[in-house]
């Protein structure tokens, strides 16, 4: 079997989505509306990834790109929310914290501040997959 880089990138996106969904389920990351946003986004991402695998048309690729951009935004939002939660927790425990000490404590807090960046990485992989995809070429027939 001779897979192209493009096919391998799509496989990585698929595996990453499934892996993140399983990890979030195991962590019971569903206690609030904001936590459910990640689950819903991943399910939409899974659907559109499978759709692109079976039928990579201009329309499905544009939908895929939109969802990958959403992954980037929601991943960044997750980093911000995790970090803010850690800042709040750290300053409640020690109100004298500030500057680099607060930053360090917040990045290493109970909520993994950088973990949502994994969703952004999947978004970047997906955008890399669709970069200059033949179905998006100007002369490509709409299927």
Image (cartoon, rainbow, N blue to C red):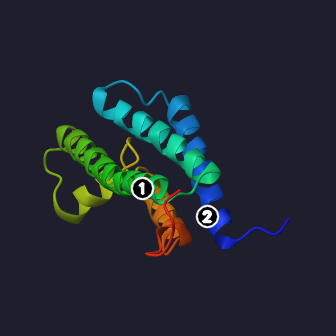
Q: Which percent across, then down, holds residue 92?
A: 18, 38
**Could you tell me residue 33's position as x and y percent?**
29, 27
The residues bearing labels 1 and 2 have C-alpha atoms spaced at a distance of 13 Å
Question: In the image, is residue 143 above or below residue 134?
Answer: above
103 or 84: nearer the viewer: 84
Mark sitting earlier along the chain (1/2): 2
Give the total number of marks visible in the rendering.
Answer: 2
**Quarter location, residue 104:** bottom left
Question: What's the residue at 61%, 64% (across, down)?
Answer: 9
Instruction: Determine crowd level at label 1: few under 14, some 14-19, many 20+ residues with C-alpha closer than 10 A.
Output: many
Residue 109 has which mark? none
Q: Which residue is mark 1?
A: 68
Looking at the rendered image, the quarter that the N terminus falls into is: bottom right
* SS label for mark 2: helix
Residue at coordinates 63% horizontally, 68% vertically from top-left? 6
Q: Is residue 139 above or below residue 124?
A: below
The residue at 44%/54% (across/down) is: 59
In the rendered image, which residue does mark 2 sit on?
A: 9
Crowding at dot 2, Cα within 10 Å, few <14 / some 14-19 / many 20+, comes out as some
Question: Is 42 positioned to the left or the right of 106 in the image?
Answer: right
């Amino acid at each position: 079997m001779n897979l192209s880089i493009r096919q391998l990138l799509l496989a990585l996106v698929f595996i990453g989505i499934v892996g993140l969904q399983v990890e979030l389920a195991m962590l019971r990351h569903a206690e609030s509306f904001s936590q459910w946003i990640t689950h819903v986004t991943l399910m939409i991402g899974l659907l559109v990834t499978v759709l692109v695998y079976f039928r990579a048309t201009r329309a499905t690729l544009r939908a895929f790109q939109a969802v990958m951009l959403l992954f980037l935004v929601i991943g960044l939002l997750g980093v911000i929310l995790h970090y803010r939660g850690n800042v709040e927790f750290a300053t409640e425990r020690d109100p004298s914290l500030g500057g680099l000490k607060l930053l360090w404590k917040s990045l290493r807090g109970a909520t993994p501040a950088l973990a949502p960046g994994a969703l952004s990485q999947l978004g970047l992989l997906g955008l890399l997959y669709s970069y200059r995809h033949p179905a998006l070429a100007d002369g490509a027939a709409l299927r």
